[in-house]
Amino acid sequence: MPFAEDFTTLARAADRLKVPSTSTELPGLVLAASRAVAHFLGYPAAFREGVEETVVGQGGAYVWLRAGAVRQLRSVRVRGAELPAGDVAIDCPRAGRLVHRRGTWPFTGSATRGIVPTPLRAWDTGEIVVTFDAGWRTPGQVALALEADPSSTLASELPAELEEAALLTLTALHRVAGRDLNVVSRATGTASVTWRTDASAVPLLAQQLAAPHQKPGRRHA
């Protein structure tokens, strides 16, 4: 069974792992690998319509959504009033950064008390509400559409490098199944050394492929 989050198809995954496409473990492995890459990116990558987020306003030209791969703005409301479409634009889709073209965003948060209030701390008060579409149609979403309607012409929009990153991660997960990922052993002749090391669910090569789509400022352990 495919999942909307899947970065690749069960057929491609089976071919990469050289296992039957009917393997009961395959759907779970594909989903786990896809979620691992999405976590590395720092945002859900499957296509989502009509997402609503509230953002922090700092009184400048920019605000940042939590989402990445922002595709299209549907509406922007500030304190209940919808801004004209031409006032706001997607400045950096990957970062989820929006620019106010005709002024500045209001400051949201706390201000000092006194004759002339001044900003003290910016936080999300819910006063700026953005509705948008984000992400790419994934192979999983395409597979689900075909299951619902075999005549569906929906096509995947996921960048090829992200699918390959998921396949690399899938291969790594399959190879280490049943092993402690934090234990590494090396043997030379009759001597052997075993030590613990930090391991990432997403292999280095997969990280390098996915990095151009990663949300700026994203950090991983």
Image (cartoon, helix red, strand yellow):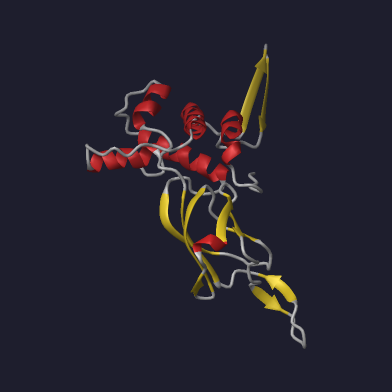
Left or right of residue 58, residue 137 in this image: left
From this viewpoint, is residue 2 visible? no
> Looking at the rendering, in which quadrant would you find the N terminus?
top left
Residue at 52 percent of width and 47 percent of height = 69
* x then y, percent, for residue 63: 62, 60
Q: Residue furthest right?
A: 115
Nearer the observer, 198 or 102? 102
Left or right of residue 12, residue 63 in this image: right
Left or right of residue 107, residue 94 in this image: left
Residue at 63 percent of width and 72 percent of height = 108
Nearer the observer, 18 or 132? 132
Nearer the observer, 1 or 215? 215
Residue at 36 percent of width and 23 percent of height = 19
Residue at 45 percent of width and 37 percent of height = 158
Q: Is residue 52 above or below residue 185?
A: below
Number of numbered callouts drawn: 0
Quarter assignment of residue 181: top right
Q: Is residue 118 above or below residue 40?
A: below
* x then y, percent, for residue 147: 25, 40
From this viewpoint, is residue 110 visible? yes
* x then y, percent, for residue 82: 49, 70
> Looking at the rendering, in which quadrant would you find the C terminus?
top right
Left or right of residue 185, residue 177 in this image: left
Q: Residue furthest top?
A: 189
